[in-house]
Image: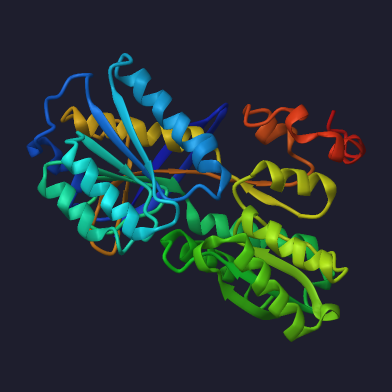
Amino acid sequence: MRRAAVAVAAGAMAVSLAACGSAKESGDKSDSSSSAKKGDAIKVGLLLPENQTARYEKFDKPLITKKIKELTNDKGEVVYANAKQDASTQNQQVDTMITNKVDVLIVDAVDAAAIKNSVQKAKDAGIPVVAYDRLAQGPIDAYTSFDNKTVGKTQGEALLKALGSKAKDGKIVMMNGSVTDPNAAQFKAGAHEVLDGKVNIGKEYDTKEWKPENANSNMEGAISALGKKNIIGVYSANDGMAGGIITALKAKGLKVPVTGQDAELAGVQRIVAGEQYMSVYKPYAPEADAAAEMAVALAQGKSLDSVAKDKVDSPTTKGVPSVLVAVTSLTKDNIKDTVIKDGVYTIDDICTSAYKAACDKIGLK
């Protein structure tokens, strides 16, 4: 196993990460595909997994579309579909994209294993596939995401910091993501690496489909099982679930540190209000740009060497050319230096009338 470094810019921030891989490069096959030697007039299929998490429609789709247009002199076409958290629907969408003869696919899988046969179908049709955000199974040609284990570590470290000397005075609840999402397993592993032995984990859940309402039900069950006086904190794998968790906590008069991920507007506002302790800020622009750059290169039969410096192994494909992007722990102390500085939100977006007093209190004005 070897390690290689990749540098990615996120605004003014340059980051360097490493991932494991082998010498076999799946991207090397792209020259033989039917889409090779294309010009700028390419057709890119973009398949995103769901629309409950704000990021996909608000950031990923428009950012990828914008970059593809930029890279193709406005001649590239993006054909978009959202699976709305249904793996079967997404497989059908791949079939439709193949029928429509797209030149390349960017796929954020609902279920990384269930998409495997569809990825193979695309490959058999000469259509290269870029796995986006989640490491899909099957013969993918490229992959971009965040350093997902580091995301879990970042969340775990933040929770420990929030708990301080009281880390073992009670029990925490762990609300992990969906078992169908390989990223969720990596977040979970990273969090456990930090938390195990340092806190008492009273209850732990793998939350079906990442849904806030499922997290809410799980949290209600945890409170009932553990007793509200014994819960000192909650590891939540993302902001959407944190919202459901906090609703359940509020109903029982509980206020404890809760983690999150994605820096959703509602999550940032809860951080401002002191309801949620932190989120993980993942700069979507460099991830989206990397996906667009790799997709255009593959569609045009070009090498990925100048874009993808990493290699990552999936359960089915070794040495996938990859770009991994760094993350930041977002708390009330660095909102200005993260989501506002990078233009994700304005102060007016965050500090609506309901949050104006809280914003003033932390100097966000």
Q: Is residue 23 left or right of residue 339?
A: left
Tell me where residue 44 appears, x and y as whole percent. Answer: 28, 32
Q: Count the numbered circles shown.
A: 0
Closer to the camera, 68 or 329? 68
Please state if 60 lies on the left or on the right of 242 as rendered: left
Q: Taking 356 as reference, is 119 above or below it?
A: below
Q: Position of residue 317 (x, y in %)?
A: 23, 58
Rendered residue at 45%/35% (across/down): 61
Picture coordinates of residue 189, whole percent (x, y) = 51, 68
Quadrant of res 41? top left
The answer to whether 244 is drawn above or below residue 106 in the figure is below
> Would you say residue 169 is visible in this rendering?
no
Farthest top residue in view: 73
Q: How is the image coloured?
A: rainbow
Q: Quadrant of residue 39?
A: top left
- Residue furthest out toward the bottom: 225
User: x, y (%) of residue 302?
Assistant: 18, 29
Is residue 104 visible in this depiction of the protein? yes
Image point (22%, 55%), residue name: 118
Q: Residue at x 25, y 34 (%)?
A: 305
Nearer to the camera, 345 or 31 = 345
Quarter of the rendering occupied by the C terminus: top right
Quarter the N terminus occupies: bottom left
- Residue 244 versus residue 17 in the image, above or below: below
Q: Is residue 231 left or right of residue 101?
A: right
